[in-house]
């Protein structure tokens, strides 16, 4: 699996910190897309109350990241810099879920796209294919 | 946490006596299940009897045709033991998938089996290898040991001392971990020992670990993943919860059984 993120943060002053921010953001986005789901029962009780049930992304859920920049100097401050804190988290869920909808051939895929949700989506693709024949 | 008395047992006999004397008491092994339960006030025993220091309960050895593992043996010891890796590599691999390093360094085989969590891994190995659970009082075949959710054949003051695993010709375990806790969403253990072929499923059954006769029959004829083609378990009687529906678990049992057979063949 290959993951590439290209951002425009203006002038990058400390590349190590910026890349770390992007890594963290991607992890958060992948968590949102695939793992993190808060579930309440019918009485309103939170049933994902601990990390035994609520799945935070961990290192083994993620590929290595390839991070790069396009630099357009920001005209409104003397350093030419832009914010970068949440950049990874914005595109990541979209990229992941688009990859899944592309693979299954329809858009009925919930977030988080857990193994069961993807399995159900694949069942639906088979049904749709049959109906189209 | 509620208040409780703490006793440290010197040996198995001492532990059994302490358990009996203290009345409403519980054994403390690795504490990975019991301590969180106490912290959440889901249990309030009057006393804990700690068997962590009982040397005779810990260890791994080959005795005749059996691999014998003491009840206090930690998951990490089973995972890394050269003896286990040589005799039953699938068992070492299973221990390696339990929880995380902290859990594996504390949790014990005896505690896991006594607890009989429907998503725990060791019950699948015990049933899937036809193990014998040895206690302070008797020997119990795995087929009679696991009684239901968190229920076993153990009496109140009965202590698991050892587990005897017959060394099979081949065995395999495949686990689909719950992505959050890493307990088994579904785990399937298969083994072949002469004419005895076993398929044991954990994580899926409403009543805990169970065997699949139809798969065992197919594997008896041809011990390969291919022999399991087209054999499906029914969702009825399987667990449905926030992590997986009974239908999805039924699907996973088929997939994991094939992977287990492929890794064993
Ligand atoms: C984060 C986390 C992840 C986990 N993931 C997994 C997993 O992936 N797979 C898995 O299988 N397990 C998992 N576990 C459970 C773990 O394997 C525990 O170690 C195990 O279930 C209990 O063993 P223990 O030695 O900690 O027992 P304890 O918590 O000390 O005791 C559990 C129960 O067994 C009784 N008991 C203990 N020893 C004996 C004995 N010798 N005879 C009779 N009764 C006894 C105790 O009285 C108590 O009722 C996980 C636990 C945690 C906290």
Image (cartoon, coloured by chain):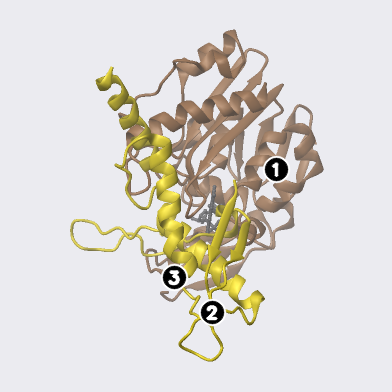
Quadrant in the rendering for residue A128? top left
Q: Disc 3 or 1, which lies upstream in sequence? A: 3
What is the distance, in whole Å, between disc 2 and disc 1 at their CAs? 66 Å
Mark sitting on residue B69: 1
What is the distance, in whole Å, between disc 3 and disc 1 at their CAs? 29 Å
Chain hosting mark 2: A
The residue that label 2 is drawn on is: A73
Chain hosting mark 1: B
| SS label for mark 2 | loop
Q: Nearer the viewer, mark 3 or mark 2?
A: 2
Decide: is B186 above or below B178.
above
The colour applied to the residues of chain A in this rendering is yellow
Chain corresponding to brown in the figure: B
What is the distance, in whole Å, between disc 3 and disc 2 at their CAs? 55 Å
The residue that label 3 is drawn on is: B39
Decide: is B195 above or below A104.
above
Q: Nearer the viewer, mark 3 or mark 1?
A: 3
Same chain? Circles 3 and 1: yes
For the C terminus of chain B, the image quarter is: top right
B76 displayed left or right of B82: left
Of residue B82 and residue A51, the one placed in the foreground of this image is A51
Q: Is mark 3 within 8 Å of ligand 1?
A: no
Same chain? Circles 3 and 2: no
């Amino acid at each position: 699996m290959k993951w590439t993120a290209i951002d425009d943060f203006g002038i990058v002053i400390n590349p190590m910190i910026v890349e770390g921010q992007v890594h963290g953001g991607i992890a958060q986005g992948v968590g949102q897309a695939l793992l993190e789901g808060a579930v309440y029962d019918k009485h309103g009780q939170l049933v994902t109350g601990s990390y035994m049930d609520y799945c935070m992304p961990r290192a083994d859920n993620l590929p290595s990241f390839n991070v790069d920049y396009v630099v357009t100097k920001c005209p409104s401050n003397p350093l030419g810099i832009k914010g970068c804190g949440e950049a990874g988290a914005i595109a990541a869920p979209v990229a992941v879920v688009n990859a899944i909808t592309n693979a299954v051939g329809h858009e009925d895929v919930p977030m988080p796209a857990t193994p069961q949700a993807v399995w159900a989506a694949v069942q639906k693709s088979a049904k749709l294919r049959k109906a189209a024949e | 946490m509620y208040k409780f008395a703490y006793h440290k047992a010197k040996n198995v006999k001492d532990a059994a006596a302490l358990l009996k004397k203290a009345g409403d008491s519980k054994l403390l092994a690795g504490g990975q299940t019991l301590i969180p339960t106490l912290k959440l006030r889901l249990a309030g025993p009057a006393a804990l009897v700690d068997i962590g220091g009982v040397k005779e309960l810990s260890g791994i050895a080959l005795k005749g045709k059996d691999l014998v593992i003491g009840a206090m043996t930690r998951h990490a010891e089973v995972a890394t033991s050269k003896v286990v890796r040589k005799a039953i590599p699938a068992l070492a691999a299973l221990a390696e998938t339990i929880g995380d390093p902290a859990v594996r360094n504390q949790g014990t085989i005896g505690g896991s089996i006594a607890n009989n969590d429907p998503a725990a891994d060791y019950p699948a190995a015990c049933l899937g290898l036809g193990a014998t659970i040895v206690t302070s009082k008797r020997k119990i075949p795995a087929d009679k040991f696991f009684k239901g959710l968190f229920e076993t054949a153990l009496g109140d003051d009965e202590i698991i001392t050892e587990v005897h695993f017959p060394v099979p010709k081949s065995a395999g375990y495949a686990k689909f971990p719950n992505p959050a806790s890493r307990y088994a969403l579904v785990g399937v253990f298969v083994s072949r020992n002469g004419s005895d072929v076993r398929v044991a499923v954990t994580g899926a059954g409403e009543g805990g670990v169970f065997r699949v006769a139809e798969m065992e029959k197919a594997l008896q004829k041809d011990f390969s993943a291919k022999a399991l083609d087209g054999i499906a378990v029914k969702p009825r009687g399987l667990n449905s919860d926030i992590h997986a529906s009974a239908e999805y678990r039924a699907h996973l049992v088929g997939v994991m059984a094939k992977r287990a057979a492929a890794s064993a063949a």
